[in-house]
Amino acid sequence: MIPKKVFVYDPMVFPLKLWVCFRPDISRIKRMFDVLDEDNYVDYKPITEDDIKPYWGACRLTVRHKASMETGCLLLFIAMNEFNEGMVVHEVNHAYDEFAEILKIPIDGETRSYLTEWMTNRVYEAYRKEERG
């Protein structure tokens, strides 16, 4: 099996990364990332089966990349037969909420519009790259 790519994007104006992956190899994702512990919102912990369910169409995780120690959001699009604009908007909005919480930036207005547009464009950029191989 060819490993699926995990695309990484840097919004430049915010100190967080955005990772995007289609049809993820969950065991590889677990080796690459730790997930934010939502009980204390400070520590990171290993990703477990409760964090990613294979039957979900997509999910968003707040993560730390183990190799680089960079933090941000990981968008996983699992069920590609269900991939659509609504799914992208749904996950991007979750990602923005995490960026806003971590960075203490506005939850609405121009900042939200700019960053959700940027994230949506990155998802579709990654999708085009993934489909081309």
Image: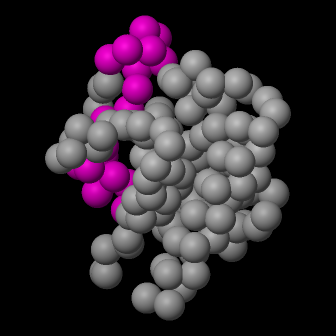
Give the percent coordinates (x, y) of residue 3.
Answer: 31, 74
Residue 79 seen in this snapshot: no
Q: Is residue 81 left or right of residue 27?
A: right
The quarter of the picture where residue 100 lies is top right
* Quadrant of the rendering where the N terminus is positioned: bottom left
Q: In the displayed image of the protein, which residue is found farthest to the top?
A: 40
Seen from the viewer's position, the closer of residues 69 and 74 is: 69
Quadrant of the image occupied by residue 123: bottom right
How many numbered markers are drawn?
0
Look at the image and tell me in which quarter the C terminus lies: bottom left
Q: Residue furthest left?
A: 67
Residue nearer the viewer, 93 or 84 = 93
Rendered residue at 49%/79% (across/down): 130
Q: Is residue 87 left or right of residue 124?
A: right
Q: Nearer the viewer, residue 38 or 11?
A: 11
Q: Relative to 37, is 128 above or below? A: below
Name the residue rendered at 18%, 47% in the picture: 67
Q: Position of residue 89 (x, y in %)?
A: 76, 52
Q: Residue at x 23, y 38 (%)?
A: 69
Counting from the top left corner in percent of width and height, residue 38 is at: 48, 18
User: In this view of the protein, can residue 44 be seen by the observer?
Assistant: yes
Q: Tell me, yes or no, whether the highlighted magenta stretch contains residue 125.
A: no
| Picture coordinates of residue 98, whole percent (x, y) | 58, 30
Q: Quadrant of residue 121?
A: bottom right
Query: Horizontally, is 34 left or right of 78 in the view?
Result: left
Question: Magenta region: which residues?
Answer: 25-43
Q: Is residue 29 magenta?
A: yes
